Amino acid sequence: MRGRGAKIAGVLPLFMLFIAGTISAFEDIERLRIWPLPAQVSHGGRRMYISGDFKLVTEGSKYGDTSGILKEGFDRMLSIVRLSHVISGDRNSSGSGGSALLQGLHVIISSSTDELEYEADESYKLVVPSPEKPSYAQLEAKSVYGALHGLQTFSQLCHFNLKKKVIEILMTPWNITDQPRFSYRGLLIDTSRHYLPLPVIKNVIDSMTYAKLNVLHWHIVDTQSFPLEIPSYPKLWNGAYSSSQRYTFEDAAEIVNYAQRRGIHVLAEIDVPGHALSWGKGYPALWPSKNCQEPLDVSSDFTFKVIDGILSDFSKIFKFKFVHLGGDEVNTTCWSATPRIAQWLKKHRMSEGEAYQYFVLRAQKIALSHGYEIINWEETFINFGSKLNSKTVVHNWLNTGLVENVTASGLRCIVSNQEYWYLDHIDAPWQGFYANEPLQNITDKKQQSLVLGGEVCMWGEHIDASDIEQTIWPRAAAAAERLWTPYAKLAKNPNKVTTRLAHFRCLLNRRGVAAAPLVGGGRVVPFEPGSCLAQ
Amino acid sequence: MSPNLLRLLFLLMIFISLSITSSLSTPSPADSPPYLWPLPAEFSFGNETLSVDPALTLIIAGNGGGSPIVRAAFDRYMGITFKHASGRASLLARIRFLRMVEYDITSLKIVVHSDSEELQLGVDESYTLMVSKKNEQSIVGAATIEANTVYGALRGLETFSQLCAFDYLTKSVQIYKAPWYIQDKPRFGYRGLLIDTSRHFLPMDVIKQIIESMSFAKLNVLHWHIVDEQSFPFETPTYPNLWKGAYSRWERYTVEDASEIVRFAKMRGINVMAEVDVPGHAESWGTGYPDLWPSLSCREPLDVTKNFTFDVISGILADMRKIFPFELFHLGGDEVNTDCWKNTTHVKEWLQGRNFTTKDAYKYFVLRAQQIAISKNWTPVNWEETFSSFGKDLDPRTVIQNWLVSDICQKAVAKGFRCIFSNQGYWYLDHLDVPWDEVYNTEPLNGIEDPSLQKLVIGGEVCMWGETADTSVVLQTIWPRAAAAAERMWSTREAVSKGNITLTALPRLHYFRCLLNNRGVPAAPVDNFYARRPPSGPGSCYAQ
């Protein structure tokens, strides 16, 4: 039935698998098949099984779980371990008798709060089986969100044995102590260039938890469309692509809630004064003029009233301590070209560049007044870094060496250098994502502590609901390990982790995430038949 | 009220309302098309906008109305229809603060006449759907689906869900252009999609996503090409070494997994047709049982000389019979390169002993496999080469599946065989250079004029061969082009053949693609010439 390319041997992938297996045998750490690699791991060689009614118990935990975050996280963990498999094997007779059977997971959380706070403790300690209760695994964490990370790790220890039809954990006893290297581990999505439906955003959030990413940077609005409802200025979403490619205010609140219950912060962005043409669809007064529509009119108080209205509305639903105000790629020629604004500039003795600074700083003040700390793209630092509010976090994307300069000036920084961490660069290979070190050339401890972390960016010009997952994954996972795992444990040569990353990619596939093959560089399709593990 | 009386009233009402609505609004080319995919056989609509209660209640009637299949489908479609936070989530708030809110559609009545849940080829999938505002005339409620079988009710629910749209201004679900009267049934009983889990393993969750998406386009057969030369991912209890031919120990299906796929599909009115492609495309069998290879150095086709070969086939089919209740079973039979038989001494001797050419042996193999399938109470399906090579010897019950030659169905039905149309030039989804309109314009009945012969074309199938389609790209390679074929196979021939499809079909297909996206299915842009390519630039889903 195959018109072409039908006679491709299945031998090659199997051979590659064999090679890969041989290589990894040299490196015990790579045989662990955990992604991202935990800070400390030890294991034994004993096989255990998961009981059919594997239970969550929380004796001794200070966390009441009144909102069900832990219980839901536990249920999600079980469902991604079981997937759709029928667990029919007789667990009691399998392995070395009943003592190899795990009845449940004992979770002990020492903090009672549900609050998802930035820089809160995300650590956990996972012991399988528990020394005190040998028929249970034990997970200890400071906060419920640390426990959620522990559940993710636990899910990766579990495997469905297709022959015995049981879920097993190999290499017990496990003793894992883990915590992230960076507190900010982000992924940007862009709902302006293409609208992303709610189920798609939720799928992205779920997949982020598998790699322990913790910030969804939502670049909501841009030049092309304004999809979000802003109750204070209800015509803004007239700038949506169509009447249905929109998010209600409640939808956005639901996204935040959905993410929070998975330990993920949502960083909302409005990118001002450039990248804001779509605002004027509902309020043309925001444009310098009908034929010169970007950046936003710097001369009009109305512009800042709208920003204030948006940020006021934001503060009701986006509870993260930061808001992103953009500030990149501002082409100010429209300001001088519009007589009204040119006069205003003259009156206030401002150059275009000074007006850009004026705009960004005024927007910063508005954000501060709503209780936010600010993130701005790096051009704001390059142009007027010394004027930026000290609560500013500078978001790198363009220049190498920027992180050194920002941290030297005492400001905080997030790394997203485009040549390595822009996912829309579809020919950028995963190895580059893995090797990109946020603390490159930064030796001073104080400066290092100002690097909050990093973010991979999924810009949406060529990304819609049809290709977002395979453009994000598995490359975002490579960056996720860089951001999570202690520096000393990271591979100097990314190719050493190929087998383990391939396992993680196949794990994503099994969980229904359309992660792309590793072989071929960048975002690729499989070039021939073969095993998921070898591609 | 007895079902018959109910039906009478219902029909009477349709008649009354049809006469009303036709005066209100007659569908004309100037109107925006009804955004339904595939287009129903008969429909009429008005110009009212009705709101739908997020707490829509299900009222069941008829012998089959109580089926769990109906209940589960209703719950699924409620989830799809009310996925915006302001729908279900704020319901309590609404009740508390807005006691006055009244919805036009507060209940959905589903009437199913038959209590049989048997899902077989040709099962009655027809339904009637009526949506109108409550008034004195509407004795049977605001929205009603009536069907002979639960599977007809499922198709009606899908159509109902496509009428429902979330309105961002009122933040409620609305039905535009009511009242609606739809009487619908498929043109073909077999509307298939092939998946290939041998070239790339597809995890359970992905197969379920595919099945779920099929139900949105009213496709009804999942053709599961389970095994091929590259890998054997399937557990066969009778021959437990066979799945040693899997790519890895993770890339396998247990018997229970397969049963779960069949159950999941049945809940959506979809049959699963399993395929074991013999004697070619079977190299992976020998990883577990090397005796099945002619020799270690020449491994395909299966060794025709050994009884063991047919014992294994019989064992596989016996095991599969317990899993796959569908009456059709696919035995492959395509692309058989018999060189290995000629070049292997013991096979060559066997051929000489029987005075067989390699072609005779090919026929012998296929017919013997057919008899095994028939003995298990299956109707065999074979790829077209079996018909072109020895059509007169095939069991008369055989269904021929076309792929290669464009007029093979014409020839097969002329000989009295049934046929499935899958012309590779148009309906092979792995051919990325076939744009949606070519898929759409391909007619399975082309060149077949005699109505009695037309009936032998049981339908068609789009084929998602897996050489370059794994979990990461399979859904966007299937969609939206499979939808183009789905409408061709469901809607009336007149509806899909008349007029300028850029006006009659393209806007609806854009809409359907966005609907798939909104339901989480990564359907690719419609307008790209090459399939599964990313969008060419920023823009609206409805314009790409």
Image (cartoon, rainbow, N blue to C red):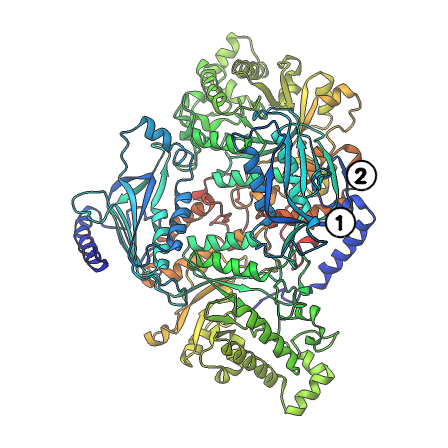
Label drawn at residue A46: 1
Q: Is mark 2 on a helix, strand or loop?
A: loop
In the rendered image, the vertical position of residue A474 relative to residue B69, given as above or below? above
Q: Do labels 2 and 1 share a chain?
A: yes
Relative to the observer, which residue lies in front, B459 or A501?
A501
In percent of width and height, residue A236 lies at 42, 26
Relative to the observer, which residue lies in front, A56 or A438?
A56
In percent of width and height, residue B432 lies at 54, 57
In the rendered image, the vertical position of residue B405 relative to residue A48, given as above or below? below
Q: Is mark 1 on a helix, strand or loop?
A: strand
Cα gap from disc 2 to disc 1, whole angstroms: 31 Å
Number of residues whose C-alpha sits closer than 10 Å to that of mark 1, classed few (under 14), some (14–19) or many (20 or more): some
In the rendered image, the vertical position of residue B443 relative to residue A38, given as above or below? below
Compared across the picture, whether B286 is left or right of B410 comes to right
For mark 2, what is the residue?
A492
CB atoms of marks 2 and 1 within 8 Å: no
Callout 1 amino acid: Arg
Q: Mark 1 lies on which chain?
A: A
Q: Is residue A339 visible?
A: yes
Label 2 or label 1, whichever lies nearer to me, is 1
